[in-house]
Amino acid sequence: MDGQDSAADEPTVPTESAVEVSAVLPAYDEADTVEHTVETTLGRLAAFLPAGAYEVIVAEDGCEDRTPAIADRLASEDSRVRHVHSDERLGRGGALEQAFRAADGETLVYFDTDLATDMRHLEELVESVHMEGYDVATGSRWMPGREADRPAKRGVPSRWYNRLVRFGLDSELRDHQCGFKAFDREALFALLPEVGDDHWFWDTEVLVRAQARGYRVREFPVDWTPKDDSKVDLVRDVLGMGSQVVRTAWSMRVAPRLTPRRSIAAGVVLTVLALALMTRYIPVDAVLDGMATAETTLVALAAAVYLLSWPLRGLRYRDVLAALDCRDGIGFLTGAVFVSQTGNLVFPARAGDAVRAYVMKTRRGVPYPTGFASLAVERVFDLLTIATLAGSVLLGLAATGEATPLARAVLGDTGATAGSAGRVGVAVAGAVGVTALVAVVAILASARSERTLVRTAFRRVSADRYADRVAAVVERFAGDVQRVAVDSSAFARVGAGSLAVWTLDVLTAALVLAAFPAVDLPAGQLLAVCLFAVSVGNLAKVLPLSPGGIGLYEGAFTLLVVALTPVAAPVALGAAVLDHAVKNLVTVVGGTVSMLYLNVSLTTAVAEADSGQVTAPDAETVDD
C-alpha cells in the first residue's frame, strides 16, 4: 500500500534521514478531520522548520471508517506525509508507540487530530525539545496565562483527576492529559519499557515516569477549545483511569521494594497485627476469666474438627474448577485455599482472593478471569448455604414461638455485652443474606436468557466505545459462574461440599461453647443455637468492615447466644472469641505451611495478581 508502513518489527532507531521532527497524529475514525489536520500541521511546521526537516505521520488505529483510505491518499500525494496502519485496535498509547518507532525524527511530537489546542503553540512545543534541550514538553490547560473554554462537567473531573495524580504519583505538573506533547527520542524510548498502559492513561504515565527518572520536563500554558461534547463516563474515567493510578503507584513505589525477604517479613507482621486487632473490638478483660476455664480437651477437639474441613474445601474447589474444565489434585487445591484464606485475614477487602487467582495462574495456567470466577462460585455457594441455614433456624424459631427474645435483642431492648456490635452484625448479615439469595436468582435467570445482559447494563452507564471491552471481560467472568449454576450435577456436588464445610464449622463452634463449664445446654439446643449464631456471624463478616471480620462475628454470635439461651454474656463472648481465634489460628498455621509448600509470598502474590488481572480498558481522558 503506497505510503503505508508495516505495523510489525519497526525500528526504534531512525534510519539515515534529514528529518529532525516527526509529528504524529493519533487517529481513530477521524475521516471528517484528518485531511484538514494534516494540511494545518504541514503549514505550521513549514513556518519555522526548513524543508525536509519534518514529517507528519497519521497513526491510524484500526479505524472502521474512511480514515485509512484518506491517510493513504495523503501519503501518496505528499512525501512529507506517512501512514502507519494497524489492523486492530492498539489503543491510543499503543498507536502512538507504533508510530514513534516508525518515525525518523529525533524530536517526536503528537497532538490530537481535533486541534483542540491552538496550533499557534506548535512552534513552542517543538522548540522546547528540539532547540532548548528539554526531554519532554507538554501543553497545560490549567496553568496561568491560558484560555480554556471548559464547561464544569469537563473541568471539575479534570481538576480532581490531576489532583489525584499529583498526590498519588508525586507529579509536579498541573495537566497530565492535554493531547499536546513532545519528546526527545532517546528519553522517550528509555521510558517506554516501564510504561504499562497502552491507551488513554499513557500520557499521564509517561509524564509521571519522566519526572521520576529526573528528565527535564517543561509544562507551558496553551489555549484550548473543546471540539466535542465529552462528559464523565463511569467505565472510562472512574474504573479505567482510577485503576491505572493505583497500578502505577504500586509499580513505582511498592513493587521495587518488595524483595522476597521483605515480602515474607511483611506477611508475618501483617498476620500478627490482624490477630492482635481483636483486642480493639472486644473487652478482653471481661472474657479472659471465662476463657481460662474452658476445657482444653474440647477446644483441641474443636481445632481438629475445623482442620478436617479444609480437605473438604479443597474437594469443593476441585468440583468448581472441574465444571470450568480445569482439573487438579486436592492437595494442591487445599493449599491454595489455605493461602488465600490466610491472605483474607491479613489484607483488607478480601485481597486474599487475588492470591488464590495468582497461585492458580502461575502454578497451573488458569486465566485470571476463570480464577476469579471460581472464587465467585465458591463465595456464592458459601453465602447461599449459610443464608439457607440461618433462614431455616429463623423459620423454626418463628414456628415455635421462640423468636420474641431474639427480636428484643436485635432491636436493642437488652443490654448484652457486645450488643452494639452484635446488632450491627445481625443487620449486615440480614442484608448480605437477602443479597446472596437475589444474586443466585439473578445468575440463574441470566444464564437462561438469550439477551446479553452484561453489555446492556454497561451501555446504560457508559457511552464510551471501549465499554464493550470491559463488558467482554465481565461476560467471561459471569459466564464461568453461570456454567456451574446451570449444571445440575456440578451444582449438587458443590452444594453438598458447602454444606459439609459449614457443618464442620458449626460443630467447631458447638465444641468450643460446650468447653465452658457455665454452659449446660442439651445437645440439640446447643447445635441449633450454634448453627444460627455461626451462620449469622459469618454473614456479618462478609463485608470487610474489620480485619478478618473480627468484631462483627463475635458481636453477632454473642447477641444470638444470649438471646436464645440462659448463657451469660461474658461467657458467650468468650466462646465467640475463642471459636474465632481457634479457626483463625488453624487458618494461619495451615496458610503458613501451604505458603512454604507452594513457595508463595502473600505480599508478592497480591502485588502480581493486581498487576496481572484483566482490567477495564484504560479510560479515555476526562477532557478529550
Image (spheres, grey):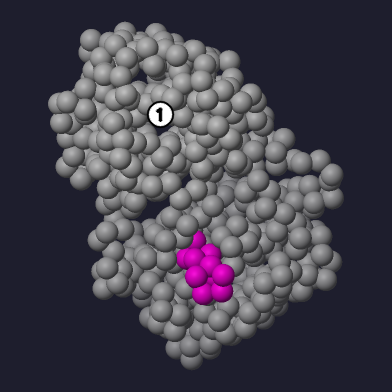
Q: Residue 152, percent across and down?
A: 43, 13
Magenta stretch encompasses residue 355? yes
Q: Is residue 272 left or right of residue 85?
A: left
What is the chief secondary structure element of the magenta stretch? helix
Q: Which residue is mark 1?
A: 24
Residue 606 in view (yes/no) = yes
* Residue type at tag 1: Val
Q: Is residue 415 above or below residue 186?
A: below
Q: In terms of depth relative to the viewer, which is nearer, 224 or 565? A: 224
Q: Residue 297, percent across and down?
A: 48, 91
Q: Residue 473, percent across and down?
A: 62, 49
Residue that appears at 37% across and 26% down: 55
User: On the rendered image, what quadrant is the N terminus found in?
Assistant: top right
Q: Residue 134, percent across and down?
A: 18, 31
Q: Which residues are magenta?
A: 354-365
Q: Is residue 79 left or right of residue 449?
A: left
